[in-house]
Every structure is written in C-alpha cells, then in structure tokens.
Amino acid sequence: MAGTRAEPIAIVGMSVLFPGAPDLATYWQNLVSGVDAITEVPPGRWDTDEHYAPGAEPRADRVYCRRGGFVDELAEVDVTEFGIMPAAVPATEPDQLIALKVAAQAIADAGGADRLPADRHRVGVVLGRGGYLTPGLVRLDQRVRTASQLVRTLGELLPDLGADQLEAVRQAFTDRLGPEAPESSIGLVPNLAASRLAGRLDLRGPAYTVDAACASSLIAVDHAVRELASGRCDLMLAGGVHHCHDITFWSVFSQLGALSPSERIRPFHKGADGVLIGEGTGVVVLKRLADAERDGDRIYAAITGTGVASDGRTTSLMAPDSGGQVRAVRQAWEAAGLDPAAPGSIGLLEAHGTATPAGDGTELTTLAEVFGPPPEGTSADRPAAVIGSVKSMIGHTMPAAGVAGLIKAALAVHHGVLPPTLHCDDPHPALARTRFTPIDTARPWHTDARQPVRRAAVNAFGFGGINAHVVLEQVAARPAVEVYEPERVLRLTAPTPEAMAALLDRDDATLLAAGLDERAATPGADPVRLAVVGPTAKRLALARKAVAKGKGWRGRNDVWFVPRPLLGPGGGKLAFVFPGLEAEFTPNSTDVARHFGLPDVADATVGDVGRQGTGVFELGRLLDAALRRLGVVPDALAGHSLGEWTAMAAAGIHAPEEVDAFLAGFDPDELSVPGLAFAAIGAPAEQVLRELSGRDDVVLSHDNSPNQSMICGPEPAVGELVDLFRSRAVISQILPFRSGFHTPMLEPYLDPIRKGSEAYSLHPARLPLWSATTVSPYPAEPAAIRALFIRHLLEPVRFRPLVDTMYAAGFRAFVQLGAGQLGSLIADTLHGREHLVVPAHSPHRAGLPQLHRVASALWADGAAPELAPLLGVPGTAAPVRRRRPIKLDLGGATVSLDEETRRRVGAALTRHRTPGPEASPNTAELGEQGALGAELSALLRDATALASDVVTASRLRRRPGPPNITASAGRGDA
C-alpha cells in the first residue's frame, strides 16, 4: 500500500475547553492521570425532576440517563478582550464565544499573533459544528414559539381572559428569559462560529463550518490540510465546537437507545451498553511542515495523511458500516505512503469508541481488517499498539469528538507518553483479533527497532455513515525550539485541616477544576493551605493522606500541606541564602533567563575558583531577579562562603556593573594557594577542633551544620585526617578546591582581591544582609564593610551558628538561590524545629519548573507569590485593564416566575373580572381536555396556576402535571 506521501502538515498550536479541562495543560494532565470528568447534569441544563425517568414507559420528554460531560463552571470569556460588548452576550450563542477564546489560546500556544503570516488573506479557519438546538436558539424559541403557544393555549382554556391579561402572562414569561436584544440576534446564526472567529482575529482566508455529525472536526482538519497542501493558505485553524445539552438532544439519543442505561461510558468493554453525551471545543493551528521547521515553530506532531469516506447504501442509515470506515482509514494511510498492516506501523490508535455495542463492534471489525492481527511476540505487557478513547473520560463531544482525540494523540506523540483509557478492565472479545490493547495507566512511549517512530492515528465516525481518519507522527529530531510548558498547580485553602479533608473528598476532576487557577494571586484567605505541583492521581492520593494526618508536609513528591503557615502577616521571616563553591556545578537556568529576558550563566569549571565563582554569582543573581519577578521579596539575605559576595550584590551594596567588571578582569590563577586541600568531614565542628588541637598546619575552615565541617591545610596532612575520621566511620572526602579561602593561609595572596574590593563603590543595602563571619547583620559603615569583606576570606565560615541565630531572630523560611546542597545544611541545623527550606535550583529539572515549586512552597506557607509570570501572562499587578470574565449561560432549562412576578401577574389576571357561567368550561369539557391540561401544566406551572386562580376551584378540576415551564422547542401551534 505504501506509495507517494502527501505533504506533511505540522500541528504548531493547540487549545481546548473540555469537561474538567479549561486549557491544554490541564487536559494533558487529566489524560495521563486518568481523570474521569463525567458528572450528573448540572442545574440549569435541563430539569432532571421533569425528564429523568429511568425504567418508565418510553416517551419523547423522558430520558433514562442523567450523566455526561459538562463545562458549565469553566465557560467564562472576557469578551471585551475581543471587542465584544457584554450586553451582546445573552443573545449570542455561547459556543461562538467559546470557540473565539479557544482559537485565540491556540494561536497564543503557537507563539502568538505576531507569528501569523503577515498576509492575513492566507490564514483561514474551518470548524466542525452540528446543527443542533443550542442554548441561544433554545432561548429564542422559548421567547418566540413557546410564549405564543402558552398564550394561545391559556386563551383557549380560559376564554374570558382579556388580551391585556394574556399579554401580562407573555411578558412575565419572556422577562424570565433575560433581556431581549434584537440587534445581537445575529449571534444566533450557526455558521458564525467560524465567521466571528475570523472577524475578531482578522483572519481573511476561508472561514466556514462543516457538519458531518461526529466526524465534523476531523473533516474540518481534512479541509484545512487541503487548503495548506494546495498552497492557497499558509496557516489554518481547524477544530470542532459542541455545547448542546438541550433535553431535545438527549431525547433523540434516549429514543434511539444509544445512551448508557448503566450511566457509564466504557469504550471496548465487554459489557459496554451505550454512550454518555459530552461537550467541548478544541482548535489546532496547522502549517506546512517545511514552513514550520523554517520558522522555528514548536511542532507537536505532523499530520501525514487524512481520509474521508461515506458508507454509501447500507441496511440502515443509523447503523455503522465497516466498509465506509475501512475506505476512510486506508485512504489516510495511502496519503501517508504507509502500510497500516506493517509491523511497527502504529503505536497508538485513538478510536471513535462510543461504547455502543454496534459502534464498538463495527469499529473493531474495521481495525482487524485494516491493521491486521497482533504480530508475533506481543503481549499485554508489550502490546503491538495501544488503543484508547478519550470519550471514556469526557463523554462523546459529538462534532468536537474528532479534535478531542486528535489533540490527545498529538500530545501523546509530543510527550512520548501513551495515555490510559478508562473502564476497560474486561475488554470486548473482538479486541483480541486486533493488534491493539487498552492500558489503564500511562506508560512511556519508547521507540526502538520495532517502532522507530512514534506514530498515531485517530478515528471519527459520524451518524449517517460519514467517516474520517487522520495519521500523525513525531517529527524527526532537529534543533529544539524552547517552549515552556508549565506544570499545573492545585492550590486550595480551608479554615481547618478537617475542612481541607472535606474539600479533597471529591473526584479528581471536580477538585482540579476548583483549584487550578494559577492566575489567582490568592485562591483563598483561609489559613490551612495545600499545593500540589502536577496534580496526578498519585499525588492527589498522597495529598489526601497527608491532610488526613493533619501534620505539615513540605515538598516530598511535590505536595505541600501546611496546617499552620510560617509566613504571612504576623508570621515568620523569609531569607534568601546564596551558596558558594560546590563539588558539582551544572546550572539549569537557560529557560529562566530566556523566559524573563535576563542574562544567562556563563560556562563554569568546577575547581577553577575564578570561573566557577563567576558562574555561582551569575546563577544567584539570575534566580534572585526571577523570584523578584514573581513578587517574592526576602526579609534578609545571607550567603555561604563566596555566596556572601552574591548576597552583597543582591542587597545592592555593590552595583551589578562593577561586579561584572571585576569578574571580567579577574585572574583565577592568582587565587590558587599551592599545595593546599580542603576536605569535608561528617562531624560537628567541636569534634573536628578536638582533633586539630595543637596543630598549626590544618585549620577548621567551615562550620556548616551539626553533621558537616570542613578543614583546610597541606594536602598530605588533610589526607591523614581524612583517613583518621574514616577509620572512625565518619564520612570524609577530599574536595576539588585549592583556594585556601576562609583560612589564614590565604593572607599572602590577598592583594589582588583587596585592591579590587577597594575599587568598589559601596551603596546602602536595600535589604538586611547577614554575615557568616560575625553571625550578625552587616555593618552600615563603608570602612567596616570593607574590613569584614577581608575577614570573611581569612576566617572560618560559621554557617551553623548563622542559621541558629537567624532562626532565633524569627526567620522560618530559607530559599537557596544556586546549585548545591546548602539547603540540606540548613535542614540539618534546624532539625526538630518547624521551618521551610526550598531550593530555587535543582539538578533534576529545568529552572522554570523548579521556580514553580518554590512559588508553590512559599504560597503554601502563607506567602503570596504570583504564579502568572511563570505562565507567560501578566501578573495581577500589571497595568492591564480588563473586565472580569463573563460566565456564559449554557442552559436551556425550564424557568419559573419569582414570587413578586407571580403576585403582580396574578393581580392583573383577576382585575375587573367577575366570571360567569359562560366563562367556565364544564366538567365534561375539562375531562376531554385532561391530556392537554397536563401538557400545559408541564409547559407553564406558575402561569397556569395564576390563571386557575380566576376560576373557582370547584368548577375547575385540572389534572396535575409536572411542575416546570418546559424549555423544549419545536412544538407546533395547538
């Protein structure tokens, strides 16, 4: 089957709004963590008391399922950002505004509007969208058709009501639907989901919607790929939007028997019994791969083939047919120039997977025919390929289902992780005839000789037999484009540990939706705080255990739980501590420098005092500046060894440009004392000094902590002492330094440093600075500062006493600004006393993720750092004037009159009216109209009750009905 390949199309930006996922980062976190975002229908969507009737006799207004995927709490848009007046929102379809927001976020994810082609005529958008009864149309239908039907039916039942009285009922009903804005009704035109997006974002290429049922968004991607391949456009947005949960939509699926009676969606499970309806929007930004590589774009994956085919003539319009599916899949693989049945051709298949027996069975038949049986040597532990369906987590998002799967697959290819699928512990028997295996936990996606490329494919098979398939794969290795993808942080507050435990007693999706707003400077004012970086299911389980114990948990496995914060108003103080030279020094700081536009660290060599010292200084200065950008300002500064120089510069005693000039002209060879060695001894200073008593060749250079000291002297003598301590089971080792710092042996070599320091201009310190020589704050007089600078080089570092003294002065939190293990020395010294130590640099991860952990730790302990600058968005203090996001109304449920309106309309109905015999229907007539009365009661509880008040109870015996005004549309006139 392999042949000529179509031109690959790069996915360079993505964004989503799906159940439990307000953005792309949360979506991916939910996917790999296996978050089930299915919930019961929220209030306002449709009335479960009225329509939910499992086991009842089938009827159009009854459904037997009430669980699905919803985004109600996440549907917020700052419309003023797009030049839309808030007054226009109520009469605008919410999905248009959501699509606009998600598309703008996708462009931002691709690098921002500045990276769009200059010729906007070559930028287009295609969205998949169904022609369903959406919230805006429901409200318009209620205003136009339902209100008229109500008034007509009331007039027929109660002919003595005057026109003004009936108009009062109409007005009361329509008032409850919100203000009427005729000028904004253009917002209800369906195709404007794409046109509004193009207009607000100034995209002047093709802009339209397609409706191919559940295949809509993949067919939109196919259209976009063709626009790019033809050369007519240089960048395309494509995706799908679906925010219809009207009861009429549910009624269709209920009458078809497609909804799950067990109210669980279990794709490819042996007992799968139906679908659960979801909603959401997803948008991808596409470019020709060659253009994306030329422009230095971050590329999630490359689309190498698309296929679209219909079932044609089959036994039933609604029954899926494998023939059409097979044609679409093979068409895509032919376009990719690949044989789908070849070994190692595919690693992940994101299936349509609706969990209906007919749908799953037909799809598995298709997969067996196209991809073949499992190759030899595969097993559940080593599958040939993984199969999944995101519907198991968010429900079936209908026209947006394809793009939900495409974005999942692209993220999996990009991150090299195979996500799990849920609720498939007992697979469909037909799965065994395919090469695909479901997994229940995320796994690394390794490439090897068997699968040299991470390649995935996505199915979307629509009602009526329209089928789409997309093939995508990783891009060959090339110079990486640095794009920061921040981890999410869950932040929760509560008044007590017990209240925090109650907050955590929710499913993961609800929990994450409640506490994942990093842009909020203060998620809550309560004292008990919890922060979880990268909140996976495992970390959330650990958080629940930590909270249940009620004791502080600071940082292990990226969880911080603090029942009594150390910082904040009336609390302890915060210190920045700067490390000196370390045995290992490999800065992870390039991403921090690039993100904040700060100077990066120059190359440094361990053991070369000058060059490593320069690197230590530059790293400390960089981290200090980055933390200030996050609004983290310490109460004091301190340093260990040469780190005290960095602290002096951070305090403002030395101007940065003078320090740079000094370091640039510094000769490292002038700081090497011949024949000296340093050694670290795993014992307290008192024990080491006893061994040094009576000797003048070896001295104590550092009192670091209760379990570490350092000595310096001639290398043979230091070696003997190291052997001595080792013989006593004391951990000891020679260090790669020869400087003689912090010993009298450096005195003959001090002239270059003394001269350099005297050339400095000293400035008043902006922050208190503590000395590890005097174990007290620095003096203010310039002469005293210069003298202490020299003493610092000739006397021992007394870091343990310094930490003890600072703790006694109220310091409770210490942030290490640099590489090494300085934080462990502080923790050793303060063992048994409540404190926080967190490093701003880690050898195990890049700089920005580590800063995220610092900010989370400080926040959990009562501080108020801003996380927004880490996300690349303006902080809360930035002078950006915007309105609060508007919460979109996605509902179309029944409305009820409030008490005041009921009283007012009731008075209007009874005014100037004395009913006579001719005004009251007789009992027989009412008996014949009983069914209509019940239907009317379902249509309008309050208004019919008011109308009945004008007729004596003895002469009007209506059959009671359900108690709400139905939001259904499409009823004809009576």
Image (spheres, rainbow, N blue to C red):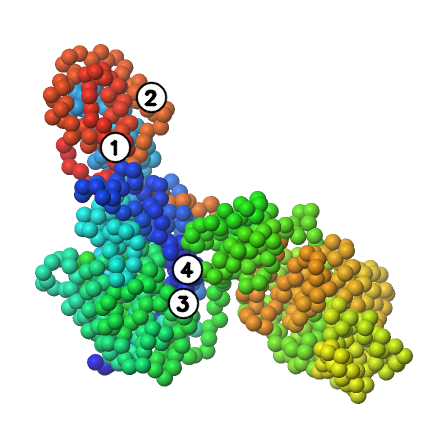
At horizontal 19% and vertical 60% (from top left) the residue drawn is: 358
Q: Are marks 4 and 3 in contact (CB under 8 Å)?
A: no
Q: Disc 4 versus disc 1: distance between alpha carbons?
A: 39 Å
Q: Find disc 2 in the rendering and name its residue.
A: 904
Mark 4 is on which residue type?
Asn
Kind of residue indicated by mark 2: Arg
Which residue is label 3 attached to? 442
Quick one: 520 or 454, which is closer to the camera?
454
Can you give x and y, in whole percent of width and height, for residue 929 in the image?
Answer: 14, 26
Asked if marks 3 and 1 touch (Cβ < 8 Å), the reply is no
Chain-order first, disc 4 or disc 2: 4
Q: In the displayed structure, would residue 783 be above or below residue 193?
A: below
Q: Which structural element holds mark 3?
A: loop
Dot 1: few (<14), some (14–19), or many (≥20) neighbours within 10 Å?
A: some
Q: Earlier in the sequence, mark 4 or mark 3?
A: 4
Identify the element where label 4 is drawn. helix
Identify residue for label 1: 962
Inter-mark Cα distance, 3 to 1: 47 Å
Please indicate whether residue 971 sits to the left or right of residue 684 in the image.
left
Label 3 Cα neighbours within 10 Å, binned few <14 / some 14-19 / many ≥20: some
Q: Position of residue 538 (x, y in %)?
A: 47, 61
Q: Give the CA distance from mark 4 to mark 3.
A: 11 Å
Q: Nearer the viewer, mark 2 or mark 1?
A: 1
Question: Residue 61, position in %: x, y?
Answer: 21, 40
Q: Which mark is residue 30?
A: 4
In space, the residues marked 3 and 2 are separated at their CA atoms by: 60 Å
